[in-house]
Image (cartoon, coloured by chain):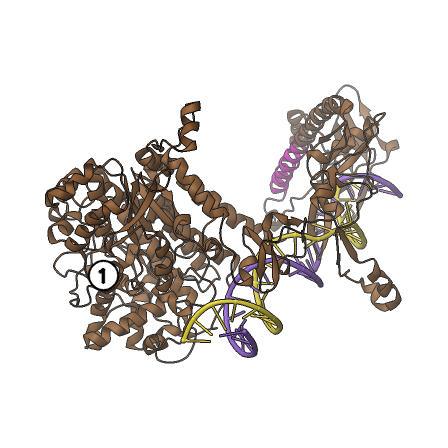
Chain colours: A brown, B yellow, C purple
DNA sequence: ATGTTTGAGGTGGCTTTGAAGGCC
DNA sequence: CGGCCTTCTTTGCCACCTCAAACA
């Protein structure tokens, strides 16, 4: 395979390894999230060190603070990244990515130990940890945009998944806080007596909830940042002050509903980092550019328990607007950001606007023309949008993870009240900032990106008297909306926000209820992670959720369903299964999109215009409607067509008398020879059409059966083994090496097994693996192969041993010769230059061994048989050389002729002689 | 002003059945 | 000399994606 492909595979497998199996144990979900982030960082780190210059790098500081530090990015363009730039990224007192700090980080980088990340110390370290980003200004002019590579896509998907897991974990924490008995009791104590009666209502309708929601709405307000208290998820303080974040208010509403024995869920939009690279979290790929910056993750835009708010916020005056809850959140964010800029701008109001702009540009994927953002865009424009997004995504994932990591201590006793994530085991990990302002600034860059007015949290209450079978009713206490599930999408869309994941939490579990709120699924389908992965993650959580909320539905007596359930007694629909049906129904009854492009990858509908080359409509109907004059067909009518050969790989063959359903032109690559012969080229064009067949034209592959031990082969004398199904009946595929030689020796008919292709040199070549033989020969072959293998191994062993002996002999012989020469010419300077290479072939194996003693003209003038040589003979019992020579001849090659040999039967010594007088004694083994 | 269509341009993925030369 | 093994080299088309201009 090409290198490109193998790299891709590696990445994919990495990603799967890292993310896979996260659903196995719900109780370790948080751990898994943390580990995933750790791995992610490690990977990002690696990526950053590679040639991918766009990838930010990260490092681990020694003082227990993990600092995530993108290296200075080259500029995308132009001008002035002055103070504004640092405003966008960091306030002055924070670790601004200036040159000196960069240098320091780069130095430290050498000490970074990957295994720290690998081992998940990010999450598990007992010490308080600060996770912080520092965005450094770009300094080098760079290409404006870059297309996403496969690696970028993998990384974006990884970030997306990690972020999802983190947000899921957070949702579960909020949900469990809603179960806190103290919170519930406190709420009940505040509740007017007439409303408490609601707990006795058995037949609940959404209308009945109205006064309750009204009371909530009147008594609890979403607010902006309170400068005195750190922004944490603290239901108690929200309860006390009757004021809290949108998330807290929504959670309080859920807690109240549960206190009244209503079945209620906490619902949250998981506003997650984009699954695509260099995109912010926006729902709609077409247009709405300016809405991008409005997106952010609630984990960041909302002040989390893990980040202190060290800076004062500007007071809020705009409390009672529409979408107040989110406004509160966004205001908070804006203020927080603004404060970090005030030091630079000096004007709070300006600073606020600026900050919004900065944040926008940071989260934005475009340097859009939004007038509001252009003020500061100049500075951020220089940063590539992909980088910005990447930083954002990592921030999101990291901060979200930090919230959920268990096992760490609360930062202070004052904060460790019961209300914030009630039970100790569920307590929020406080990530202690060594430098609070640093961290806050880091977050502020993200915070400003809040979408204005987009509802992110609400409650769902199960009303048994709604519909026939009961219904989950959407209740947004902050905005005083009851049963407004159809309004959510438009509200979210109006705020340019994303509705990709709507998850309901209950009983420590979670369920994806996006379908209930999203009417235009095709718009978000591509923005979601693969359903396989998502479903597997949610599977254990779904069980928990349905366990907590899934009461048996009390069907109304006059309904036929009721009769059915009474009759059988076995079919008792649970709330959960009924909801599944409801959501599934919505999935299958989506209205026809009004724009053509939506049909390109629509799961339900298709128009012919957007079919690909290998797709046809079969059958052509029914027509469900029209879009811009194009008939709309059900997606199930779209069939994939393939060539005969392609179908063959799937063990299917085209039926007799079937005509190709489609023919496409296949540009045959003209060979170089054909370039000179235009006539040939033109002729070949006519047969360049590729015939395609559909699934309905196929039948199971009917290969000729093996007869008389002969393997049926194709026109190339081989068998294409795409899979076991492609084997002719009566044959087997033997994949061991050198099988063919065994088969050949036994004279068994075989065919090489072609298992695929390798692409090399611009062409593809078949890859063979083993042979195909008739099944009856399998055992014989295996047996013979085992024998052969044994014999071969024995032979190899023998050869190795002989070689070892030979080499020992050569070595010792050299040593002895050297010693002998030393003795003889001790005083001669030659001794130090003695050649040691005595080359001699294995005399045992040749009748006329050839030796060379032309040792670089330095051969001793006179050789004598030395006693030591005889000793060596007896000691080694190996071929021995006796150098009883008399006439050294320069460059002479000894030739030992058979007729000069003498053999001493007593000593078993064979003496070979050269015509020159040189003789060699060989001891026969 | 906003949304939609269209086309340009770029990237990733799929395509798919040798030859020469050295060694044993 | 024949069989086996290694090395040679890195296409070109199409689908898909993004972007921007034109259009509704």
Q: Can you see residue A181?
A: yes
Residue drawn at (31%, 71%) of the image = A358
* Extreme residue in the front direction: A558
In the rendered view, tell whether residue A21 sits above or below residue A82. Answer: above
- The chief SS type of the magenta part is helix
The answer to which of A623 and A111 lies nearer the viewer is A623
Q: For residue B10, which quarter of the picture?
A: bottom right
Residue A481 screen position, x and y as percent: 27, 54
* Extreme residue in the bottom direction: A79
- In this rendering, position of residue A244 left or right of residue A384: left
Whether residue A819 appears in magenta in the rendering, the answer is yes
The answer to which of A741 and A624 lies nearer the viewer is A624
Segment colored magenta:
A804-825
Residue drawn at (22%, 65%) of the image = A336
Whether residue A676 appears in magenta in the rendering, the answer is no
- SS category of the residue bearing label 1: helix
The answer to which of A235 and A925 lies nearer the viewer is A235
Q: For residue A924, which quarter of the picture?
A: top right
Residue A249 screen position, x and y as percent: 21, 52
The residue beneath circle 1 is A328
> The numbered mark 1 sits on a residue in which chain?
A
Q: Can you see residue A427?
A: no
- In this rendering, position of residue A175 left or right of residue A24: left
């Amino acid at each position: 395979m090409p290198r490109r492909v193998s790299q891709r595979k590696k990445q994919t497998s990495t990603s799967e390894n890292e993310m896979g199996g996260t659903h196995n144990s719900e109780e370790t979900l948080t751990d898994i999230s943390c580990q995933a982030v750790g791995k992610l960082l490690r990977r990002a780190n690696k990526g950053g060190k590679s040639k991918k210059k766009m990838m930010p790098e990260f490092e681990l500081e020694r003082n227990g603070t993990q600092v995530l530090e993108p290296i200075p990015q080259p500029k995308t363009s132009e001008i002035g990244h002055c103070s504004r730039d640092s405003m966008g990224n960091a306030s002055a007192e924070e670790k601004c990515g200036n040159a000196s700090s960069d240098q320091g980080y780069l130095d430290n980088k050498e000490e970074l130990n990957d295994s720290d990340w690998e081992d998940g110390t990010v999450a598990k370290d007992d010490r308080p940890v600060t996770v912080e980003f520092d965005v450094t200004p770009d300094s080098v002019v760079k290409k404006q945009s870059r297309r996403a590579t496969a690696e970028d896509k993998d990384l974006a998907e990884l970030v997306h998944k990690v972020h999802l897991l983190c947000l899921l974990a957070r949702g579960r924490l909020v949900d469990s806080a809603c179960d806190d008995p103290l919170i519930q009791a406190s709420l009940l104590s505040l509740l007017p007596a007439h409303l408490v009666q609601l707990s006795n209502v058995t037949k609940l309708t959404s209308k009945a909830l109205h006064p309750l929601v009204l009371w909530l709405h009147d008594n609890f307000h979403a607010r902006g940042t309170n400068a005195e208290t750190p922004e944490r998820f603290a239901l108690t303080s929200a309860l006390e002050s009757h004021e809290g974040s949108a998330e807290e208010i929504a959670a309080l509403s859920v807690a109240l509903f549960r206190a009244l024995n209503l079945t209620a869920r906490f619902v949250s939009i998981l506003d997650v980092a984009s699954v695509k690279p260099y995109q912010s979290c926006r729902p709609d790929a077409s247009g709405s550019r300016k809405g991008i910056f409005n997106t952010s993750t609630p984990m960041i835009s909302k002040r989390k328990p893990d980040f202190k708010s060290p800076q004062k916020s500007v007071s809020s005056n705009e409390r009672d607007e529409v979408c107040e809850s989110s406004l509160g959140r966004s205001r908070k964010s804006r203020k927080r950001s603004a404060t970090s800029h005030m030091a630079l701008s000096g004007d709070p109001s300006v600073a606020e606007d600026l900050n919004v702009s900065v944040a926008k540009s940071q989260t934005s994927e475009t340097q859009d023309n939004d007038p509001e953002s252009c003020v500061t865009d100049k500075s951020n424009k220089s940063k590539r949008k992909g980088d910005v997004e990447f930083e954002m995504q990592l921030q999101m994932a990291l901060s979200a993870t930090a919230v959920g990591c268990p096992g760490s201590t609360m930062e202070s006793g004052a904060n460790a009240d019961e209300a914030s994530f009630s039970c100790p085991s569920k307590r929020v990990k406080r990530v202690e900032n060594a430098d609070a302002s640093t961290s806050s600034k880091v977050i502020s860059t993200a915070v400003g990106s809040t979408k204005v007015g987009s509802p992110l949290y609400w409650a769902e209450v199960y009303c048994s008297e709604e519909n026939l079978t009961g219904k989950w009713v959407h209740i947004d206490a902050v905005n005083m909306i009851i049963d407004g599930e159809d309004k959510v999408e438009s509200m979210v869309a109006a705020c340019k926000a994303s509705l990709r994941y709507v998850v309901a939490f209950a009983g420590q579990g979670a369920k994806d209820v996006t379908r209930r709120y999203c009417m235009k699924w095709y718009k978000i389908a591509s923005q979601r992670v693969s359903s396989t992965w998502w479903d597997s993650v949610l599977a254990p959580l779904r069980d928990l959720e349905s366990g907590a909320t899934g009461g048996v539905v009390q069907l109304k007596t006059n309904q036929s369903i009721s009769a059915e359930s009474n009759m059988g007694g076995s079919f008792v629909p649970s709330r959960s299964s009924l909801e599944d049906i409801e959501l599934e129904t919505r999935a299958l009854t989506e209205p026809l999109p009004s724009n053509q492009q939506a049909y390109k990858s629509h799961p339900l509908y298709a128009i012919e215009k957007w079919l690909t080359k290998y797709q046809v409509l079969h059958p052509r109907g029914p027509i469900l409607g029209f879009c811009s004059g194009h008939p709309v067909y059900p997606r199930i009518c779209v069939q994939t067509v393939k060539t005969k050969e392609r179908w063959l790989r799937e063990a299917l063959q085209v039926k007799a008398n079937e005509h190709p359903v489609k023919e496409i032109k296949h540009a045959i690559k003209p060979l170089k020879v054909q370039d000179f012969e235009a006539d040939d080229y033109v002729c070949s064009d006519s047969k360049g059409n590729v015939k395609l067949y559909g699934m309905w034209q196929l039948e199971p592959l009917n290969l000729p059966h093996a007869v008389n031990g002969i393997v049926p082969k194709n026109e190339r004398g081989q068998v294409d083994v795409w899979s076991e199904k492609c084997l002719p009946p009566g044959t087997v595929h033997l994949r061991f090496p050198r099988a063919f030689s065994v088969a050949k020796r036994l004279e068994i008919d075989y065919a090489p097994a072609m298992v695929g292709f390798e692409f090399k040199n611009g062409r593809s070549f078949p890859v063979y693996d083993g042979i195909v033989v008739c099944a009856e020969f399998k055992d014989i072959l295996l047996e013979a192969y085992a024998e052969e293998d044994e014999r071969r191994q024995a032979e190899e062993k023998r050869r190795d041993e002989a070689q070892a002996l030979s080499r020992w002999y050569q070595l010792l012989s050299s040593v002895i010769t050297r010693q002998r020469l030393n003795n003889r010419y001790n005083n001669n300077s030659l001794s130090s230059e003695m050649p040691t290479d005595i080359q001699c072939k294995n005399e045992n194996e040749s009748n006329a061994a050839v030796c060379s003693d032309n040792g670089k003209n330095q051969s001793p003038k006179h050789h004598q048989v030395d006693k030591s040589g005889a000793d060596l003979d007896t000691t080694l019992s190996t071929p021995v050389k006796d150098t009883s020579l008399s006439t050294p001849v320069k460059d002479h090659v000894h030739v030992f002729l058979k007729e000069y040999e003498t053999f001493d039967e007593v000593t078993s010594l064979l003496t070979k002689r050269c015509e020159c007088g040189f003789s060699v004694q060989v001891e026969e083994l």
